């Protein structure tokens, strides 16, 4: 368990330091030199692309 006030302090809101950035959390189906095709939505044009793969925890609840 984490103290709630500590948990709030460790969250980083990327829009605070990247005001002109659109963050999209989705699966990319295809990427070209200027466009990303999202698996569950429209394609997105970009000037600069950052791909952050993150991680996924696998826990079983027995």
Image (cartoon, rainbow, N blue to C red):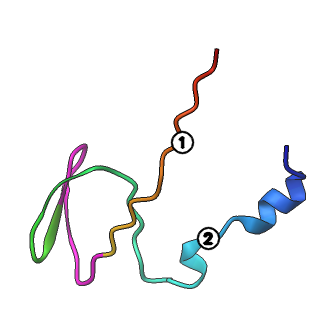
Q: Tell me where residue 36 sits by quadrant.
A: bottom left
Q: Using the image, determine if residue 50 lies above or below residue 58.
A: below
Decide if residue 35 is on the left or right side of residue 20: left
Decide if residue 32 is on the left or right side of residue 26: left
* Badge 1 element: loop
The answer to if 1 sits in the magenta stretch is: no
Read off the residue under disc 1.
Answer: 57
Read off the residue under disc 2.
Answer: 13
Q: Residue 30 versus residue 54: which sits nearer the camera?
A: 54
Residue under the point 90% across and 52% down:
3
x then y, percent, for residue 59: 58, 31
Residue under the point 55% across and 74% down:
14
Q: Are marks 1 and 2 in contact (CB under 8 Å)?
A: no
x then y, percent, for residue 57: 54, 42
Tell me if mark 1 has few (under 14), some (14-19) or many (20+) residues whose alpha carbon lies within 10 angstroms of its own. Answer: few
* Badge 2 element: loop
Residue under the point 79% across and 61% down:
8
Q: Which residues are magenta?
A: 37-49
Tell me if mark 2 has few (under 14), some (14-19) or many (20+) residues whose alpha carbon lies within 10 angstroms of its own. Answer: few
Question: Which image quarter is the N terminus in?
Answer: top right
Residue under the point 13% across and 76% down:
34
The answer to if 42 sits in the magenta stretch is: yes
What is the spatial separation of the Cα atoms under label 1 and label 2, in whole angstroms? 21 Å
x then y, percent, for residue 53: 38, 60
Decide if residue 30 is on the left or right side of residue 6: left
């Amino acid at each position: 368990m984490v103290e709630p006030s500590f948990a709030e302090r460790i969250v980083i809101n990327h829009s605070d330091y990247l005001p002109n950035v659109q963050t999209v959390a989705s699966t990319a189906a295809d990427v070209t030199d200027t466009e990303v095709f999202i698996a569950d939505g429209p394609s997105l044009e970009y000037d600069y692309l950052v791909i952050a793969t993150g991680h996924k925890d696998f826990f079983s609840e027995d």
